[in-house]
Amino acid sequence: MKIISLQLLNFRQFYGKTPVIYFAHGEKNTTIIHGNNGAGKTTILNAFTWVFYEKFSAAFASPDLLVNKKAINEVEFGTAIECFVEIIFDHDYKTYQLKRKCFAHRNKENKIVINQPQLFMMIAGDDGKWQHPLEQPMDIIERILPKSLHQYFFFDGEHIDHLFRIEERHKIAEDTKELIGVKVLERAVSHLKNAQKILKDELNSIGDITITTLIKQQKDQEIFKIKLEKDNNLLITRLEQLLLDKQSISAQMLAMGGIENLQVLKQKLLTDEKEVRKNLINTQQAIKKEISTRGYLTFLSSTIAEFNLIIKDLRHKGELPSGIKKQFIEQLLHEKKCICGTELYPETKPYSQVKNWINLAGSTEIEEAVIRLETQVNNIESLKNNFWIEINKYQENINNWRIQLSTIEEELDKINEQLRQYPDHNIQEKQRQLDNIEQHIREITLNQGENNLQLENIKEELINLEKQLKKQEVKQEKHSLIIRRIQGADDSIKCILEVQKRLENQFRLALEKKVQEIFNSISFTPYQPHLNENYELNLIENTSGIDLAVAASTGENQILSLSFIGAIIDMVREWSKQSNLVGLDSSKFPIIMDSPFGSLDEIYRRQVGKSIPKLANQLVVLVTKTQWRNEVETEMNPYINKQYILVYRSPKEDCQEDFIILNGEEYPLVKKSDNQFEYTEIIEVNI
Amino acid sequence: MINHNYYNLDKITEPIAQAKPQIKAIVEEVLQLEKDRLSQKNIRYINDDVLKIIKQYIQ
């Protein structure tokens, strides 16, 4: 940041618009503003803090009296007087015009009323065009020179030792951390932790992963399925073999003498049995089909009754069919004549009476729809009857097949019994074998049924497991991704904390060295400034080899504070030049210092005068005539590029005028006012 | 008068430079985000933005 100029309007003792004060920069970076006590030096310092932050320094008396008294009294009651501070500065290749202004007036009680000050900002970029910023001006200022740090750049030199009062110390630590960018690191850690918490919540919402159990279940079922399939194949082979045996024994028995007729009859009965069973199955399937396609008809009875009731009700009320049709009335209106012969013309009473019937009359379309619906409903009634007739027919068939089947079975039993009892032992034996085979076939068929049922269940279970596994796999993928992200956040936090630790340590030690360097260049004492972990600055004496705290004088404390401010500004300047990762986006800072040599003796004043132009990029010093003595002037002269005088106009009758000689020329410091008010004028010193 | 460097910046930022590529990217982007928002009082959605950065680099 480089301050270019300052201008005031009716701000405190500055009446009207002041000339523009331009500030020195570059090689000769120092601007001196001279003024006796009460001339407005502190006002100039506060003009900076007011325009930037709407704040005043601690030593600023009556901040309420912002607006110049002479200007307010010159106008009538109620007329507003404008007051502003305008500053122009460069930062990061842009020029900023910042203006804070307010209005004040006297009310009828002769009291001064000041309205809320407003801040205006304009920015000019490389093209030189002035534009309003897109962001809030305060946000932009905060980024360039944070409010909390302003006391290091705009300060009252006589009171800088206040910086190190015990109650202010913790603030210094905080401010310093902010300057070097620790705040950025702290906030990054805090927000990363919040993000980590959100990720942990996401993880909880996924729940436990049961993928291992599911895979085990899947494996077990697969093994069981293979075993069942193997068993089934064995059963099939066995069954095929048994059927072949049965066939062969039956053939043998057919060839045996004496039982040919029995065997033929038996074969015929077996064929019939097969046929009847087939018929039974077919009929049962037919019933199922009938129920699935037309079964719904049986549930419609109550709905049909309800529908009939509604229609009956409508008919009873005479709404179906309706007496008069809409179309009929529309025709009458169209022909402009009623059936009684009355002529119907719009806007007449008969016309509107007939027209009203449109709403009461029924529609032909509705009636037609109702008739169609009735036909369909009656049809449903007959369909329902047909459905029951069909079902009954099938049931009857089934009964018949069952009777037929039991007759066949009985006859087969009889034949088999006959064969078992047959006098020929061979035949008896063959029949026994056949009975055995049949028994086996029954058992195997039962086993097969059981097996198939189990297989069906397993297949279903496997499909189910597959689905669950897929779901779990997606879950597991998400799960591990979130875990990796939580770990990533954790690693990032650790990394930033480590940087913060190194930064704080190194910065504090470097700052301490720099404070020592500056302090030693000013002070002739053998004391050493020490900066502890809490940024508490103390003077230590070590002449006896043991560190002893020194009770510093006011002067020493001033130098100590000045050294600290100089060190901070220099460190931050260096730091921000090198690191764009953290810290401020600036490598240049101005210092505006009000009366910096208050309690110092000649030697210290000389040393301070020599040192301060080197502390900051730009230096503005506000001094009284007595502070601006030979040694200071001599030391600072090489750096001075701009000088101004605040000429105090006193209304006192016996005002003692004062002047200062600069560069061999005499300039007024105190002059008599040309009216009853005190005010200050600004004049530039010829360099 | 004051030109010496009393600290070693590389040493300070070493943990970032030596971090795994995606951690380095996350740290750098989060710090830039914080720096941009430092001056703003309103830091709504910053947690979401940090989360977005993590999700972007760890996939």
Image (spheres, grey):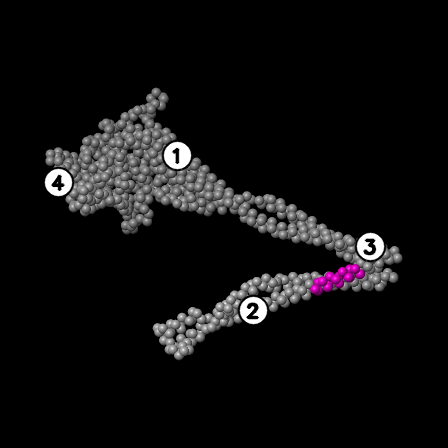
Judging by the rendered image, the residue that carries numbered circle 3 is A433
Same chain, labels 2 and 3: yes
Question: Residue under circle 2?
Answer: A376
As drawn, the label of residue A557 is none
Give the CA distance from mark 4 to mark 1: 58 Å
Sequence-first tag of 4 and 3: 3
Q: What element carries label 3?
A: helix
Residue at the spot x=56%, y=44% of the render? Answer: A209
Circle 4 is placed at which residue position? A675
Horizontal relation, residue A382 to residue A601: left or right = right
Circle 1 is placed at which residue position? A504
Q: Is mark 1 on a helix, strand or loop?
A: helix
The earlier-in-sequence mark between 2 and 4 is 2
Question: Which quarter of the figure is the N terminus of chain A placed in?
Answer: top left
Q: What residue type is labelled 3?
A: Gln
Q: Separation of disc 2 and disc 4 at Cα?
A: 112 Å
Please rate how many residues cluster around mark 4, counting C-alpha atoms within 10 Å: few if below 14, some from 14 to 19, many from 20: few
Start-end of magenta stretch = A396-411
Chain under numbered label 2: A
Q: How many marks?
A: 4
N-terminal of the pair, mark 1 or mark 3, is: 3
Q: Do the residues labelled 1 and 2 touch (CB within 8 Å)?
A: no
The spot of residue A441 in percent (x, y) is 76, 54
Q: Position of residue A216 (x, y in %)?
A: 62, 45
Quarter location, residue A99: top left
Query: Which residue is the extreme one toward the bottom?
Result: A341
Q: What amino acid type is highlighted by mark number 1?
A: Glu
Question: Does the magenta stretch mainly form a helix, a strand or a loop?
Answer: helix
